[in-house]
Image (tube, rainbow, N blue to C red):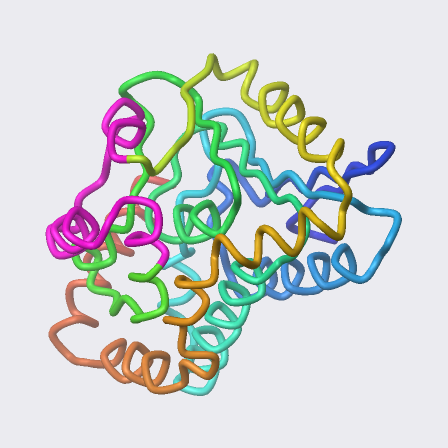
C-alpha cells in the first residue's frame, strides 16, 4: 500500500494513514482503505481494527489540490468511492477504534465518526468536525446521520450548517470524541479499549454493535447515489470552482 501502513498485532490490526504530512485523502487512499477494510472484515484471525494517523494529523480531509484537477468522470467516481467507503466503515462488524493523533476536519472526521470509539490528542490547537459547508463541498444525507447519532439531531444540525470545527474540549463536551489524552498516549489508549472489547465473545459483540446502531443503519440510504450525484454536480458550479481555485492556489503557493 502506498498511502497506508498496516501493523498486525496478536488479535487486531493497526492501520495508519500515511500520505504526506497531513494525510490528505485522494482516490488512491480511498481505494486502499476500502480494500484493506474488506480484507480485515473477511479475515477471521483479525478481531478488531484501530485507525490512526501521524503526529499532529489524523487526516486533514480530502486532498482538494489533487481533486481540483480531476475531470468530471474522475470526480464522480471519487465521490461514489468515498460514499461507499463511509458505508463500509459504518457497517464494519468488528471492534473499530479511531486513535486521532491531531487534526481531523472534514474527510478526517468522516472516517472517525464511523468508529466505535474516538480517542483524540489533547490540546486546543487540534480540531475535528464536518466543515463541508465552509469549504463548498455538498455533504450527504448519510453523513449527517453519523453526526446525529453521536451528538443528537439538534446539535448536529447547528454544527453542520455552521460548518463548525471543534476543539478537543468542545468535541468531548458534544460527545463527538470519547476522551482526550496526550498525543503520545493516544494509540495506547485505543489499544487498551481494544483489549477490553476482545474479552467479549466476537459473535455476541458483533450482534450487539448491530443492535445499538440499528436506528443509525435504518436511516442510511444504502444506495446514496442521489446525494453523491448532487455533490459531483455542485463541484462544477462556476462560483464554487472559482472559490476552490483560489483555495488551491493559496495552498500551492504556501508549499513552494
Residue in the picture at 42% in, 71% down: 218
Residue in the picture at 68% in, 27% down: 196
Residue in the picture at 31% in, 25% down: 168
Relative horizontal placement of residue 169, taking residue 112 as reference (left or right): left
**Quick check: is 180 in the magenta stretch?**
no
Residue in the picture at 42% in, 56% down: 63
For the residue pair 184 and 242, the one nearer the viewer reads as 184
Relative horizontal placement of residue 109, taking residue 247 as reference (left or right): right
The image shows residue 181, relative to residue 197, as above or below, that is above
Q: Is residue 59 visible?
A: yes
The image shows residue 73, relative to residue 27, as above or below, that is below
Which corner quadrant of the image does residue 92 belong to? bottom right
The image shows residue 122, relative to residue 6, as above or below, that is above
Q: Position of residue 101 (x, y in %)?
A: 49, 28
Q: Position of residue 105 (x, y in %)?
A: 34, 44
Relative horizontal placement of residue 54, taking residue 160 as reference (left or right): right
Relative horizontal placement of residue 96, taking residue 45 as reference (left or right): left
Total numbered badges shown on the rendered structure: 0
Magenta residues span: 146-174
Q: Position of residue 21 (x, y in %)?
A: 51, 36
**Quick check: is 154 in the magenta stretch?**
yes
Q: Is residue 256 visible?
A: no
Main secondary-structure element of the magenta-colored stretch: helix
Amino acid at each position: 500500500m502506498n498511502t497506508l501502513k498496516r501493523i498486525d498485532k496478536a488479535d487486531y490490526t493497526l492501520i495508519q494513514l500515511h500520505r504526506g504530512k497531513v494525510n490528505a485523502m485522494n482516490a488512491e487512499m480511498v481505494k486502499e482503505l476500502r480494500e484493506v477494510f474488506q480484507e480485515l472484515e473477511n479475515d477471521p484471525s483479525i478481531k478488531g481494527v484501530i485507525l490512526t494517523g501521524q503526529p499532529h494529523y489524523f487526516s486533514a480531509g480530502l486532498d482538494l489540490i489533487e481533486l481540483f484537477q480531476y475531470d468530471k468522470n474522475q470526480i464522480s467516481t471519487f465521490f461514489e468511492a468515498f460514499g461507499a467507503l463511509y458505508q463500509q466503515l459504518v457497517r464494519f462488524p468488528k471492534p473499530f477504534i479511531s486513535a486521532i493523533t491531531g487534526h481531523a476536519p472534514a474527510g478526517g472526521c468522516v472516517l472517525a465518526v464511523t468508529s466505535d470509539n474516538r480517542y483524540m490528542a489533547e490540546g486546543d490547537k487540534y480540531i475535528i468536525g464536518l466543515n463541508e459547508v465552509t469549504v463548498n463541498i455538498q455533504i450527504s444525507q448519510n453523513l449527517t446521520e453519523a453526526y446525529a447519532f453521536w451528538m443528537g439531531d439538534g446539535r448536529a444540525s447547528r454544527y453542520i450548517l455552521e460548518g463548525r470545527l471543534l476543539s478537543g474540549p468542545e468535541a468531548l463536551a458534544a460527545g463527538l470524541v470519547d476522551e482526550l489524552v496526550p498525543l503520545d498516549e493516544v494509540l495506547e489508549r485505543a489499544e487498551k479499549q481494544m483489549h477490553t472489547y476482545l474479552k467479549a465473545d466476537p459473535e455476541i459483540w458483533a450482534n450487539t454493535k448491530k443492535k445499538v446502531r440499528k436506528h443509525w443503519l435504518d436511516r442510511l440510504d444504502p444506495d446514496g447515489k442521489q446525494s453523491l450525484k448532487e455533490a459531483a454536480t455542485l463541484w462544477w458550479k462556476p462560483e464554487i470552482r472559482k472559490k476552490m481555485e483560489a483555495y488551491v492556489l493559496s495552498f500551492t503557493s504556501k508549499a513552494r
